Each structure stands twice: as C-alpha cells, then as structure tokens.
Image (cartoon, rainbow, N blue to C red):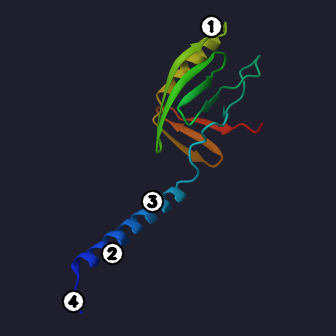
Amino acid sequence: MRFRPHVRHHGFVILAALLSLSALALQAAASGPGFPFDHELRFDGNPVRGSKRVPGLQIAASGAAEIDLWCASGKGHAIIIADQITIVPISIQDNQCPADRLRMDEDLLNTLTAVTHWRWEGQLLVLDGPKPLRFHPASN
C-alpha cells in the first residue's frame, strides 16, 4: 500500500477545524447567555423621591436603542461585538424635567456612553465602564 500524504494532511486539517469549533462552542456555553436583544432592561435601583420612574434600556438586534433616563428619554444606537458594547445617544428629549433630575440624567447618560463591556452577573446584566451599571430584564 502506498502512502498518500495529501489525504493524511486533509484529515489533519479537518480534525483541527473540528477541535477549534468544539473549543468555541465550549467557550460560548461557559460564557452564559448572550446579549438580551429586544428585551426591556430596567436599571437596578429605586425610583427617585416623588417619581415611580426607573431608567430603562432596550436594544434591538439591529442596534437601535431606546433609552429612558430618570426623566428624559430618547433614541440611540448600540454596537455590540462579543462582550464589547458602545452606546451612542442620537436624540434625547428632556421632557421638561426639573434641574436636579436633568443633572441625574446627564450623569447617567455620561456613564452609559462610557461603558465598554457587558456581562451577566447572575440575573443582572452589567454594563462595565468607569462605573458599572446593572440592569435586570423586565418581568412584565
């Protein structure tokens, strides 16, 4: 029987590809669930005194984002690649907010636009940046 090196090489390439795919599948399974596109996410915090509103975020698979702050709300765009995230506000309306809530909205929006990564921490979605923001999927 004659040795055919090209057949052996081809088999090695297939085996290496299968091992790589298996490693990627295990890594994906170990990293937990993916980003919760098209789900309403509520800020993990209490409403401010005199209001029932809690900030929220909803990001579509297309990247379109709905941003609700303490008082203001608007639209934005999100880019999510693996565990990296960038959120860019496009149009935010202040909804005739009092000055103290506008300051809170500005602080929250600045923190939101500074996030760089996302991860799951139990049932909470954490957006990591200079200050982590925690959100939970809305139950309604």
Label number found at residue 2: 4
- The residue at which mark 2 appears reads as 11
Classify the position of the C terminus by image quarter: top right
Which circle, 4 or 1, is nearer the viewer? 4
Which circle, 1 or 2, is nearer the viewer? 2
Q: Are marks 4 and 3 in contact (CB under 8 Å)?
A: no
Inter-mark Cα distance, 3 to 2? 20 Å
First reached walking from the N terminus: tag 3 or tag 2: 2
Which circle, 3 or 1, is nearer the viewer? 3
First reached walking from the N terminus: tag 3 or tag 1: 3
Count residues near mark 1 (Cα–Cα under 10 Å), then give few for <14, some for 14-19, many for 20+. few
Q: Residue 122: horizontal and vertical position, in percent?
A: 63, 49
Q: What residue is drawn where x is 57% and y is 40%?
A: 126
Amino acid on which the number 4 mark rests in the picture: Arg
Q: What residue is drawn where x is 54% and y is 20%?
A: 107
Asked which quadrant contains residue 99, the reply is top right
- The residue at which mark 3 appears reads as 24
